Amino acid sequence: MKKLALTPERRQSLVDELRRMSARDFDMPLSEFQAGEVVDRMTALIGPAIYNEAVQDVRLHLQRRLDDLDGEVFIDET
């Protein structure tokens, strides 16, 4: 299975948001390193489940579109 990875920009954005949230909501400032570790561990822990859920959502959407294909492109032969 392909390992999930964040772009450096997305990872940094999450680190920054986690640091703000932790300081604001929990009065617990995190260092850049600490927040990065949390982001990396959460990505490894819950990333695959979220990815798989997204794949299932896309599969359902595409299946609905395929089920409606006859209604969209069917040409009456008579």
Image (cartoon, rainbow, N blue to C red):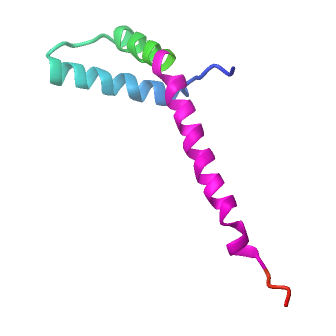
Looking at this view, is 67 or 10 the one in front? 67
* Point 23% across, 19% down: residue: 22
Q: Position of residue 12 (x, y in %)?
A: 43, 25
Q: Residue at x 18, y 12 (%)?
A: 28
Which percent across, then down, holds residue 60? 59, 48
Judge from the rendering whether residue 13 lies leftward or rightward of residue 63; answer left or right. Answer: left
Question: Residue 55's image quarter?
Answer: top right
Foreground of the two, 3 or 8: 3
Which residue is rendered at x = 73% and y = 70% of the image? 70
When the figure is inspected, residue 59 is found, relative to residue 22, above or below; the finding is: below
Taking 28 as reference, is 68 above or below it? Answer: below
What's the residue at 45%, 12% (across, down)?
41
Q: How many numbered marks are there? A: 0
Res 57 quadrant in image: top right
Q: Is residue 46 magenta?
A: yes
- Quarter in which the C terminus is drawn: bottom right
Find residue 20 and report its horizontal and vertical position in percent: 25, 25
Q: Residue furthest bottom?
A: 78
Q: Position of residue 53 (x, y in %)?
A: 52, 35
Image quarter where the N terminus lies is top right
Q: Residue furthest right?
A: 77
| Magenta extent | 45-74
How would you classify the magenta stretch by its main secondary structure? helix
